[in-house]
Amino acid sequence: MVQVQTFLTTLVLHEGMEDGYEWIVNGVRSKRYKTAQIYWEIKGVEAQVPWASVVWTKGGIPKHNFLAWLFMLNR
């Protein structure tokens, strides 16, 4: 963190030069930030339990999905 702080405080910016962001995820450059892509990259892959598709349904009501998950944990 000290190295980053030192670099940022000693950085010299020049007038008239274009400035912008560039995101690199999995070696792919992008000019746009995609929250979902960053989330899945940070989260990584987890082992899938056999009952996941029954409990976490697409388009399901989150409250009902959560309660079903609690019941599955308590069996």
Image (tube, rainbow, N blue to C red):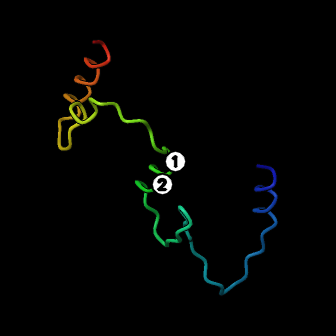
Q: Label 1, secondary structure: give it.
A: helix
Residues at marks 2 and 1 touching, judged by CB atoms closer than 8 Å? yes
User: Could you say which quadrant of the image residue 7 lies in?
Assistant: bottom right
Between 26 and 61, the one lying in front of the other is 26
Q: Which residue is at a point 65% across and 87% down the rendered structure image?
A: 16
Q: Identify residue for label 2.
A: 38
Work out whether 49 lies above or below 20.
above
Mark number, residue 59: none
Between 31 and 75, the one lying in front of the other is 75
Find residue 47 and report its horizontal and vertical position in percent: 42, 36
Left or right of 20 in this view: 13: right
Q: Which residue is at a point 48% across and 44% down the rendered structure image?
A: 43
Q: Identify residue for label 1.
A: 42
Graded by Cα atoms within 10 Å as few (under 14), some (14 to 19) or many (20 or more), the crowding at tag 2 reads some
Find residue 69 and report its horizontal and vertical position in percent: 28, 24
Work out whether 71 lies above or below 38.
above
Q: Label 2, secondary structure: give it.
A: helix
Left or right of 2 in this view: 20: left
Work out whether 72 lies above or below 48.
above
Left or right of 31 in this view: 13: right
Work out whether 24 lies above or below 44.
below
